[in-house]
Image (cartoon, grey):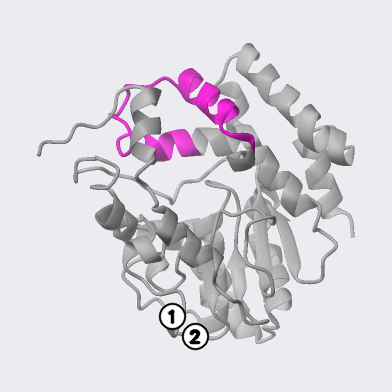
């Protein structure tokens, strides 16, 4: 059967219904964590792969013997559908998992690292990631995609995810970081993660920092491009097999706001005020960053 990539958001929505099976998701949700397990659970395009690389580098001393990062840090809620067993032994201790689940959904009992990112930048990054993979390159405008991002089911939205994790920021087993601060000072961010994981060897921390740098990850981009996921799930999403995607981008902070209209920008601000603003008194994303920076 010949498959064609969608050219509108209705087609994308329809295809994404096949992305994960209910059985597979339930397999992930029913996982029983050990107290030492690390769950890396940012919202999509908020630094998940970057954090997978940092955690894996810290726990292995910089081992790079993997085809793609998801092979060694499995995606909890997609593992079953990718032919992986979440209970299988991992290559190093502590066990580590990728996820995009909110605090409400994720299995409890482990330790959790969440990277937060400006929602407009996250949306633009997701658009670029989908362009040429989930929809025909150039066929959907950024404005239309922004509307989709804003209209997602509240329980599966950026703002619900952020609210759920922000409420846990004082939890001893939860570490929250800002994507933008990681960009500004990666060594400091890696030291934070290392302290959270109990890694103190300065040589390991230095190597993990180097291997989480843009130049290193770009040079090894095929190890971070989700090709295992595409091979496992593209057919279920009715997608042709020649799609491309990349996760190693410079991701300059704040660039998204210059790429969208005043109308969309205002809609994002309204959504923030109605969620993070009302719940936590955070005027905007910059206020959230400032709280994370304050000792």
Q: Position of residue 15 (x, y in %)?
A: 33, 36
Residue bearing the label numbered 1: 63
Quarter of the picture holding the C terminus:
bottom right
> In front here: 255 or 144?
144
Q: Give the residue at x 69% y 74%.
A: 109
Q: Give the residue at x 81% y 71%.
A: 172
Residue bearing the label numbered 2: 92
Residue 173 lies in what quarter of the image?
bottom right
N-term mark: 2 or 1: 1
Q: Give the residue at x 57% y 26%.
A: 151
Q: Is residue 29 left or right of residue 222?
A: right
- Residues in magenta? 126-154
Q: Give the residue at x 36% y 71%.
A: 84
**Is any part of residue 61 visible from this angle?**
no
Q: CA distance from mark 2 to mark 1?
A: 10 Å
SS at mark 1 in the image? loop
Residue 136, relative to residue 203: is it above or below? Answer: above
SS at mark 2 in the image? loop
Q: Position of residue 68 (x, y in %)?
A: 35, 66
Residue 195 lies in what quarter of the image?
bottom right
Query: In the rendered structure, are the residues bearing label 2 and label 1 in contact, judged by CB atoms less than 8 Å apart?
Result: yes
Q: Is residue 21 left or right of residue 30?
A: left
């Amino acid at each position: 059967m010949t498959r064609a990539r969608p050219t509108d958001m209705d087609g994308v929505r329809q295809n994404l219904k096949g992305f994960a099976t209910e059985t597979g998701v339930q397999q992930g949700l029913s996982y029983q964590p050990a107290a030492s397990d690390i769950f890396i659970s940012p919202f999509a395009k908020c630094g998940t792969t970057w954090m997978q690389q940092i955690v894996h580098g810290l726990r292995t001393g910089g081992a790079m013997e993997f085809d793609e990062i998801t092979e060694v840090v499995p995606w909890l809620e997609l593992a079953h559908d990718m032919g992986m067993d979440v209970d299988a032994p991992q290559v190093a201790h502590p066990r580590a998992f990728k996820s995009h689940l909110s605090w409400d959904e994720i299995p409890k009992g482990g330790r959790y690292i969440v990277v937060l990112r400006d929602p407009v930048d996250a949306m633009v990054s997701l658009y670029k990631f989908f362009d040429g993979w989930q929809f025909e390159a150039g066929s959907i405008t950024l404005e239309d995609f922004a509307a989709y991002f804003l209209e997602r089911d509240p329980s599966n939205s950026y703002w619900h995810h952020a609210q759920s994790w922000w409420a846990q920021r004082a939890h001893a087993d939860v570490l929250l970081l800002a994507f933008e601060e990681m960009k500004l000072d990666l060594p400091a961010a890696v030291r934070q993660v290392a302290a959270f994981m109990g890694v103190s060897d300065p040589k390991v921390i230095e190597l993990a920092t180097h291997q989480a740098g843009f130049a290193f990850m770009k040079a090894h981009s095929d190890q971070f491009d989700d090709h295992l996921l595409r091979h496992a799930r593209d057919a279920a999403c009715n997608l042709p097999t020649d799609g491309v995607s990349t996760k190693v981008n410079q991701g300059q902070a704040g660039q998204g706001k210059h790429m969208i209209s005043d109308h969309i920008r205002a809609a994002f601000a309204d959504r923030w005020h109605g969620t993070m603003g009302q719940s936590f008194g955070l005027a905007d994303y910059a206020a959230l960053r400032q709280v994370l920076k304050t000792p």
